[in-house]
Amino acid sequence: MFRRHRITLVYLFGFSLDLVNMFASNVAMPSIGTDLHTSTGTLAWISAAYTLGLTLAIPCATRWASAWGERATLLASLGGFAVAALLAGIAPNAPLLVVCRLAQGLAGGLLIPVGQAWAYRLTPVSERAALTTRIMAIALFVPALSPWAGGLLTQWVSWRALLAASAPAALVVFALAASWLPSDQTRLPRVPFLSSVPRLLRIPTLCLPMLIYLLVPGVFVGVNLVAAIDLARRGFAPTDVGVLMLPWAMASAVGIGLSRRWFARQGPRRLFFIGMVAQSLGIAWLATVREGGHASAAVAYLCMGFGGSLCSSTAQTLAFLDIAADDMLPASAAWNLNRQWAFFIGPVALGGLLAVTGHATITYVVAACLSLAPMIFLRRPILHTSPPHLETDHDHA
């Protein structure tokens, strides 16, 4: 196996662990709330603490990789991740659980940008599209399957087993990384991330997709938490809630495929419009779900999966159109930072709203409106047509 393939596998395994901990834990929140006697607001923080840790760590990752080397950074990330996961599984109360989840996110946040940059740097340009496809496949199927598996583990064993299960998995990846990753590395140049931010913020094709990511995929992550709590109150078992990510994944695959096919032909404006409307309708539909309404909940997740993925895939394609080669690494860090911020603020804001109002319907209505909010920017000229070079690339595909 080529060295770059081993490095890519380590990154993809670590990325999978990150997604499992982001999505699978939501199905355990009702059980955590019952066992630890916590409020809905505290559950929102337990859910969001992991993402907050990722958000705080990503800006530091490139500096630490420059100082310690990529191999040492990834090993420290995986080792810290395993320890924090084990501590989360045995946490005796909610405040300590929040701290453990935060520490787990801090450790995982070192792996994502460093592993991704290392894998892309060693992959020939002609093969990077295939690497991107593998990354998107994991980003699609792990969020779909992990809540279902997490629901089974929570229902048959306990929520503690679910949180601690990441520890042995991370140790396996740690062993692979220690065996596979090369130790003879050249020192990376320091990337001035903070000084690049003002320049990056002047690129409209990067900033607008980042805003859309905040208000569409970010809102969905918050709605997913609210739905886990709300549907549990309506008699849904953890496995019933977890399995809803399967129709979400099927619809997401359609959305991603249409984005890839239509971006060059239709331009991003129409794709964003369709995606925002679809997600908003799906969120609103959740308010109509009654006890035993599994089919109705599945319809809502179909709409949210299609709309959210259509927007997120289109946003990521648009974001890197006008990025110069020298700005690619800080732009990638900014994109990943915004992604984690979206996944943090969504659960905190919507979970907090549910805690304050006590009504899931009000929360769903607000979330549906937030998903439509970026429409006010869709008349901007950069969204009306697709770039000519993309049309050419598509025609040759």
Image: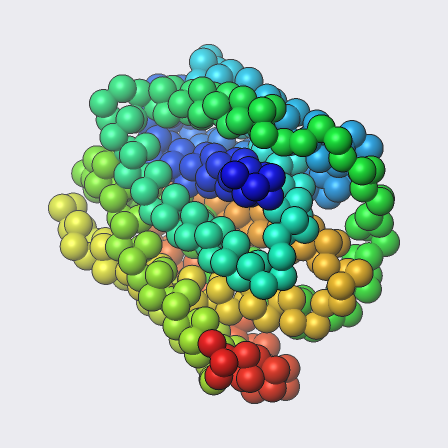
- Count of picture labels: 0
Image vertical order of residue 267 relative to residue 166, above or below: below
At x 42%, y 62%, the residue is: 309
In the shown orientation, is residue 182 left or right of residue 139? right
At x 46%, y 39%, the residue is: 16
- Considering depth in this image, is 394 or 24 the residue closer to the camera? 394
Q: Position of residue 276 (x, y in %)?
A: 43, 70
Q: Quadrant of residue 40?
A: top left
At x 49%, y 31%, the residue is: 46
Q: Residue furthest left?
A: 292
Q: Position of residue 263 (x, y in %)?
A: 49, 77
In the shown orientation, is residue 376 left or right of residue 117? left
- Considering depth in this image, is 279 or 316 the residue closer to the camera? 316
At x 44%, y 58%, the residue is: 367
Residue 115 visible within the image: yes
- Considering depth in this image, is 160 or 40 the residue closer to the camera? 160
Residue 60 visible within the image: no
Image vertical order of residue 336 relative to residue 149, above or below: below
Image vertical order of residue 140 relative to residue 259, above or below: above
